[in-house]
Image (cartoon, helix red, strand yellow):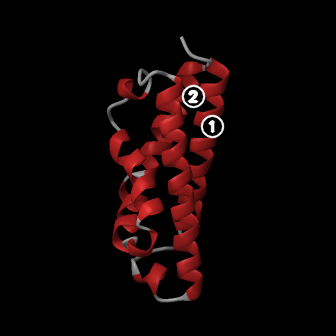
């Protein structure tokens, strides 16, 4: 068995980061909103940092729960979410704004909702 309080704390941090991404991404309507201005690039950078934090936290969550918890929630592609951290961290200067836009548009909401469900079920 794993430390339930630690797992809940990690999940709350993931949820908060995902919600922050959603809030910061809200005014972005197209990829060029990221790439065509210094303010857009700052927004892209801040979102990338949160994606790195989420990926790292998911890896820690997997380690803490002996890879038992995430597999119970297949609606999220956890491998890709964790892999995003590696891609951004190790290839930062080649980060593709289109990919980040796609993640923010199509996947962050589902991640936040799933993590919230997990928190509710574990509490």
Q: Residues within 10 Å of mark 1 (few under 14, many from 20)?
A: some
| Residue 17 % position (x, y) | 59, 50
Q: Residue furthest front?
A: 90
Q: Quadrant of residue 86?
A: bottom left
Q: Which mark is residue 54?
A: none
Q: Where 55 falls versus 67 (above or below)?
A: below
| Residue 9 % position (x, y) | 66, 32
Instruction: Give SS at disc 1.
Output: helix
| Residue 100 % position (x, y) | 40, 65
Instruction: Name the residue: 45% across, 69% down.
Output: 92
Sequence order check: which comes first, mark 2 or mark 1? Answer: 1
Instruction: Give SS at disc 2.
Output: helix
Q: CA distance from mark 2 to mark 1?
A: 7 Å
The foreground one among 106 and 53 is 53
Instruction: Name the residue: 59% across, 26% down.
Output: 7
Image-based side of 46 in relation to 94, left or right:
right
Q: Where 61 falls versus 65 (above or below)?
A: below
Q: On the image, numbered disc 2 is attached to which residue? A: 119
Q: On the image, numbered disc 1 is attached to which residue? A: 12
Residue 77, visible in the rendered structure: no
Q: Residues within 10 Å of mark 2 (few under 14, many from 20)?
A: some
| Residue 54 % position (x, y) | 52, 48
Instruction: Name the residue: 55% across, 41% down.
Output: 57
Image-based side of 33 in relation to 122, left or right:
left
């Amino acid at each position: 068995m794993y430390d339930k309080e630690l797992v809940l704390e990690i999940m709350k941090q993931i949820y908060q980061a995902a919600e922050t991404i959603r809030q910061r991404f809200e005014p972005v309507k197209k990829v060029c909103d990221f790439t065509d201005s210094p303010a857009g690039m700052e927004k892209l950078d801040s979102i990338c940092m949160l994606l790195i934090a989420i990926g790292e936290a998911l890896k820690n969550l997997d380690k803490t729960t002996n890879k038992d918890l995430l597999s119970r929630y297949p609606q999220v592609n956890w491998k890709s979410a964790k892999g995003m951290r590696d891609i951004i961290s190790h290839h930062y200067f080649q980060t593709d704004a289109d990919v980040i836009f796609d993640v923010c548009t199509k996947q962050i909401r589902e991640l936040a909702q799933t993590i919230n469900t997990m928190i509710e079920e574990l509490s």
